[in-house]
Image (cartoon, rainbow, N blue to C red):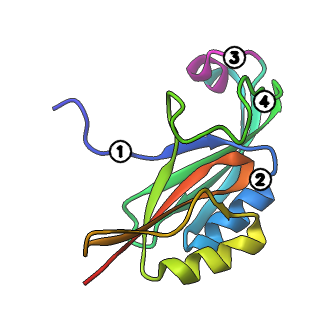
């Protein structure tokens, strides 16, 4: 077998504190923060002079992780607008299962979250909503209906 599990999803951010606060409010737990630099960082990223801050967050069940990176050097670049639409090619969202969708959206608003549309009902199975979080990240929220 080629893989054992998906270890984490990495997202580059400018404002680490705001991004950590957003995902903690969502219910993720901060595992730790550290600095990464040196030859190994350069080799695996294909960049020269890497120096970045890392925050690792995990879901409450311990099975999924989100790695936030904030580059000191080389400076992070953006080749597309932050508020890109949902249908752009490439990674476009991270999805989380939540217990109370409306409450989650309400709690995330002070952290800059804005719904892309409205809360939608998929048959009798799910309530779904996409919000734009820190750095323009689209965060999907799904509440399973019983």
Q: Badge 4: how crowded within 10 Å, few (<14), some, or many (20+)?
A: few
C-alpha separation, residue under disc 4 versus residue under disc 1 = 25 Å
Q: Would residue 105 be found to the left or right of residue 89 on screen?
A: right
Magenta stretch bounds: 41-48
The x and y percentages for residue 122 are 32, 66
Quadrant (top left, top right, bottom left, bottom right) of the N terminus: top left
The x and y percentages for residue 2 are 22, 29
Give the labeled residue for mark 3. 47
Give the labeled residue for mark 2. 16
Q: Badge 3: how crowded within 10 Å, few (<14), some, or many (20+)?
A: few
Q: Pick whichever of labels 4 and 1 is earlier in the sequence.
A: 1
Question: SS of the residue at dot 1?
Answer: loop
- The residue located at (73%, 44%) in the rendering is 13
Q: Badge 1: how crowded within 10 Å, few (<14), some, or many (20+)?
A: few
Does residue 105 sit above or below 82 in this rendering? below
Give the labeled residue for mark 1. 6
The x and y percentages for residue 29 are 56, 70
- The residue located at (73%, 47%) in the rendering is 135
Observer-side mark, 4 or 3, equals 4
Residue 76: mark:
4
Q: Pick whichever of labels 2 and 3 is earlier in the sequence.
A: 2
C-alpha separation, residue under disc 2 versus residue under disc 1 = 23 Å
Observer-side mark, 2 or 3, equals 2
C-alpha separation, residue under disc 4 versus residue under disc 3 = 11 Å
Question: SS of the residue at dot 3?
Answer: loop
Q: Would residue 75 be found to the left or right of residue 124 on screen?
A: right
């Amino acid at each position: 077998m080629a893989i054992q599990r998906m270890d984490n999803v990495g997202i580059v951010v400018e404002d680490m504190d705001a991004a950590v606060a957003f995902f903690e409010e969502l219910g993720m737990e901060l595992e730790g923060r550290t600095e990464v630099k040196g030859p190994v960082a350069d080799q695996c990223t294909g960049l020269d002079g890497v120096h970045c801050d890392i925050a690792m967050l995990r879901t409450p069940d311990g099975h999924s992780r989100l790695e936030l990176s904030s580059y000191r050097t080389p400076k992070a670049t953006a080749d597309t607008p932050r508020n890109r639409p949902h249908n752009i090619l490439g990674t476009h969202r991270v999805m989380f299962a939540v217990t109370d969708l409306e409450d989650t959206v309400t709690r995330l608003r002070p952290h800059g979250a804005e719904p892309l549309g409205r809360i939608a009902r998929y048959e009798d199975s799910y309530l779904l909503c996409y919000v734009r979080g820190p750095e323009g990240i689209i965060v999907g929220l799904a509440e399973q209906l019983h």
